[in-house]
Amino acid sequence: MFNRIKHLALTSSVLTAVAMGVASPVYAEKILRYTSVADAATLDPHALNAQTSIMVASQLYDGLVMRNPKMEKVPALAVSWKSVDENTWEFKLRKGVTFHNGNIFNADDVVFTIERTKAATSQMKGYVNTIVEVKKIDDYTVQLITEKPNPVLLDQLINVFVMDKEWSEKHNVTVPQDFKEEEETYAVRHVNGTGAFSLQAREPDVKTIFRRNENWWGHAAHKSNVDKVVWTPIKNAATRVAALLSGEVDLLTDMPVQDLERIKSHEDLQVMKTPQIRTIFYGFDVKSDELRSSNVKGKNPFKDLRVRKAIYHAINIKAIQKVVMRNMSIPAGMLIQPSVNGYKASVDENRLPYSVEKAKALLSDAGYPKGFSVQLDCPNNRYQNDEAICQATVGMLAKIGITTQLNAQPKTQHFPLITGRKSDFYMLGWGIPTLDSGFIFDYLVHSGGSWNGSGYGAVQTDEKIEQIRGVVDPSKRNAIISEIWANVNADLPYVPLHHQVIAWGASKNLTIPIEPNNMPRFYWAQLK
Amino acid sequence: MISFTIKRLFQSVLVMLFVALLSFFLFNFVGDPISNMVGQETSHAEMDDLRERLGLNDPFIVKFGRFLADAVQGKFGISYRLQRPVDELIAERMPATLELVFLSAVIATTLGVLGGLVTGLKPESWFSKFILTGSLLGVSLPTFVIGILLIYIFAVSLNWLPSFGRGEVVDLGGWRTGFATLSGWKALILPAITLALYQMTLILRIIRSEMLEVLRTDFIKFARARGLKKRDINFGHALKNTLIPVITVTGLQVGSLIAFSIITETVFQWPGMGSLFIQGVQFADVPVMSAYLVLVALFFVAINLIVDLLYFVVDPRLRSDLKGGHQ
C-alpha cells in the first residue's frame, strides 16, 4: 500500500486524488492509469474509422450489439434481435437506459444515429451503407431495412455507437465534422453517451480522464471496480516502457517487442499476449505488362505463378519469427486469423515450406535462372518491425538471385502506392473489424477493391464475392467463402507472412482481458 | 540606429517569406494526408472528393498564395489530425514549450557562465579539468540518449521524478503554467536539464576561452599593476569583455532551444509545440507543420533582431560609430 501511494504521488496527474484518498481513508478511489502510443484524434464516434477512436468510443458510448472478450456478439443497447424477412432486422431496445446527461435513451436515438452515421462527412458509413431505411415501430423497437439481404449487418453494427438525438441537436452536431469547415464541432471534445464511463476531462495528446458511470446498465454483468481511468498517451516507446517500470501507469498497450522480457522479469509487472486480428503479407503487381522497377523489360515476372511461389518458398518465416519478431508472431498460410469467419487451420498451418532449392527450380522453370531485380515497398512506422521484416526478406531473396531494393518509408507515403496501384512488390497488413472474410474479399481480392494493389481479379472470384454480399444462410455462404479462399490460395496474388501477436504490460494489481483487436475495455478491469 | 533597425526588419521579412516557401515546398514530399484522414473502407471517389474539398489538387502557386494570405492573418486552417484550428492548438501548446525553454536557458546560462569563469580563472585546477571532461559528455551524447538515461536513473531506478508529462498545471487566463505546482516543477527538471546540457557546454567553453584570452590582454595586466582588487578585475573588466560573443551565442541558442525541444519533448512526452509538430509530420498534417515552421522561423528572426539591438547596449563602440566593430 505504501509503495502504491508513493507511485501515485509521483504521478502528478492524480495528485489531487491522493489528497482526497488521504482525507477519507475509508474509501480510496480505484484509478486505472493507462498509456498507449497515440491519442484518439476525435471523440466523435462517427467521424473517424480508426482504432483509437473506436477504442475511446467503446468506453463512452454503447452500440446496439457488442462483443465479449471472446469476440462473440452479445446484447448491448439492443436486448434482442430477429430477422423479420430477409431484408429486415428488428431490434428490441433496452429500457431504462439514460445518457450521461440524464436524457432517456429510446428508438429516436437509434434512428438518429443511423442517419448520422450515413452522413456525407461520416467515415463510419461503410458499416451502415446497406441500410436503406430505419423504422421506429414503438419507443423501444426499431427495424433496420437493408437494400438486399446483409449477412454481416450485426457485425457491422458493433462499431456504430449510439448518440443522443436531443443533445446533438442542441449542440449542432447532427452530422460529423467536415474538414473543410475551419472550426471544431462540439462533439470532437464533448461526449454524451450511454457508456460505462463518462468523460471527465480531455486534453488532446496529453490526458483524458474517464469517470465511472454509476448508472450504466452493464455494471452487474461486467463487475469492474474501476472508478476512474487516466489515459496518458506516450509516443516514445522507451519512455512508455519506463512509465510502466516506474509504476506511473498500470497498463500499457503497444509494447515494443524488445522490452517484453524486461517487463516480464519485473516483480510487480505482468505481460499478457494474444494473437491479433491482423495478418501481414506481401503483395505483387500481377496485372501490369511490365514492372516499373525491374530489369526485366517487356514482361512482368510476377504474372507467373511460379515466380510468386518461388518467393514464397524463399522466405524463411521461422527465422523472421525468431530473430525479427522475437516470437511475437504466428507464421501464416492464410490472410486471415483464427477468429475470422472463413478461417481454415489446415490451410493456415500449411505454408509452402522454406526451401531455397525449390525456389530456384521454380525460378528456372519460369525462365529466370539468374533471377531479376525489383523494388520492395515497405512501411516503416505501421506494423510491428515492418522495416526489419523487409530487410530480412531482401537477404532471403538474394539467395535465389532476386535482387531487391528496399524502399522503406512512412505509411503516409507507402499506402498511396498501394491504393494507387503504383507498387510492384509491397508489404501490407490487414485487420478485419467485422470478423468476416467478406471484408477482406471486398477490399483486397475483388478486382475493384480499393486496397487491392496487386490488380488481381478473376471474373469467377469477383462474381462469388458479389454473391456472398447477399447470402444470409450461413452454411451456403461459408461454402462460397471457402471456394473463394481456395482460388486465392491457388493464385497467390499475396504471400502470407504471419499473424501479429500483441502484448500488453500491466501491473500485477490489474486484471483485464487482453483482446485480439488491441483495444482494452476498462469495464472489464479489476484493480486490487 | 533607426535605419539599421528598418534594414534589419526588411531582411527579416525576406527570411520569413523564404522559410514559408521552402517549408511549403517540402510538404509535397511528406505523403498523402488523405489516407490518414479516412478509414481503409473509404472508396477512391470519396478520397478524391475530400482531396478536392481541401484544395489539395490546386496548383502549387495557388496553394502557396492562399497559405500566405491566411498566415498573415494568423490563420493556419484546421489540423487534419486533431480536427481543431491550428492557431488554437499552437496557442495551447506554446506555454509548455516556452516554460521548458525558459528554464533550460536559465540553467544553461547560469551554469555555463559559472563553469566558464571557474575553468577560465583556474585552468590548471583538477576541478576545472573535471568540469571540462564532464561537459564533453554533454556535447557528444545525443539528446535522446541523455533523456532516456536520466529517465532510467531518476524515474525508473530512484523513483524520484516522473518519466513523462508536465504534471499538474494551473490555468492563468489561457496560459497553462507548470511553475505553480510541485508536480509541475518535478516534471520540469529532467527535460530542462536534458535540453540545457548542450547549450550549457557551449556557453561554458566560450566563456572559458574568452576569459583566457582577455586575461592575457594589456589592460588586465595594467589593472593588475595598478593594484586593483582581483575580484574587480575578474568580474568588472574581464567578464564584461567576454560578453559580446556570449550574448550572440545565447541569443541564437534560445532559438535553437525552441527548435531542439522537438527531441526533448518527444522523449519526455512533453505536451509542447515540438511534440505537436512531430506527430503532425507522421500524419502529414500539413496545416500544423507549416504553422510550426513559420512560427519557429519567426522566433529565430525576432531573437536575432533583439540580439543585434543588444549589441548597442553592451558595446559602447557601436553606439558612437556603426561601422566599428569588435574583434
Image: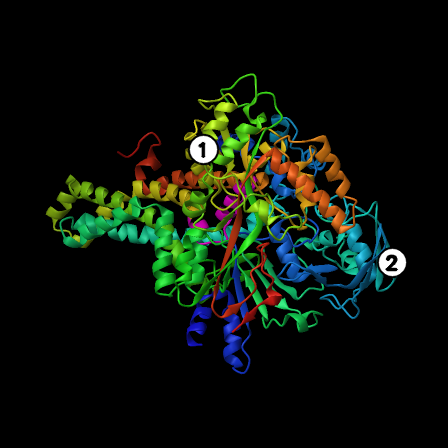
The answer to whether tags 1 and 2 share a subunit is no
Can you identify the residue that label 2 sits on? A136
Give the residue displayed 50% in from the left and 28% down from the top: A362
Q: Determine which quarter of the picture holds residue A288.
A: top right
Local SS, label 2: strand
Q: Nearer the viewer, residue A331 or A261?
A: A331
Give the residue displayed 33% in from the left and 32% down from the top: B321
Screen quadrant of the N terminus of chain A: bottom left
Q: Is residue B126 magenta?
A: no
Q: Is residue B269 magenta?
A: yes
Asked whether the viewer can see residue A212, the reply is yes
User: What separation in Å lies between label 1 and label 2 (alpha carbons)?
Assistant: 70 Å
Q: Is residue A72 left or right of residue B3?
A: right
Q: Give the vertical position of A233 relative to B208 (above or below).
A: below
Q: Position of residue B301 (x, y in %)?
A: 46, 38
Q: Nearer the viewer, residue A464 or B210?
A: A464
Give the class, few, some or many, for how many residues have Cα within 10 Å of label 2's Cα (few <14, many ≥20). some
Q: Determine which quarter of the picture holds residue B107.
A: bottom left
- Mark 2 — on which chain does it sit? A
Q: Amino acid at mark 1?
A: Arg
The numbered dot on residue A474 is none
Q: Position of residue A318 (x, y in %)?
A: 45, 44
Can you identify the residue that label 1 sits on? B8
Q: Amino acid at mark 2?
A: Lys
The mark closer to the camera, 1 or 2, is: 2
- Mark 1 — on which chain does it sit? B
Q: Position of residue B63 (x, y in %)?
A: 62, 30
Q: Position of residue B158 (x, y in %)?
A: 35, 65
Find the magenta span and give its range.
B264-284
Do labels 1 and 2 touch, CB within 8 Å? no
Q: How is the image coloured?
A: rainbow
Q: Residue furthest right?
A: A137
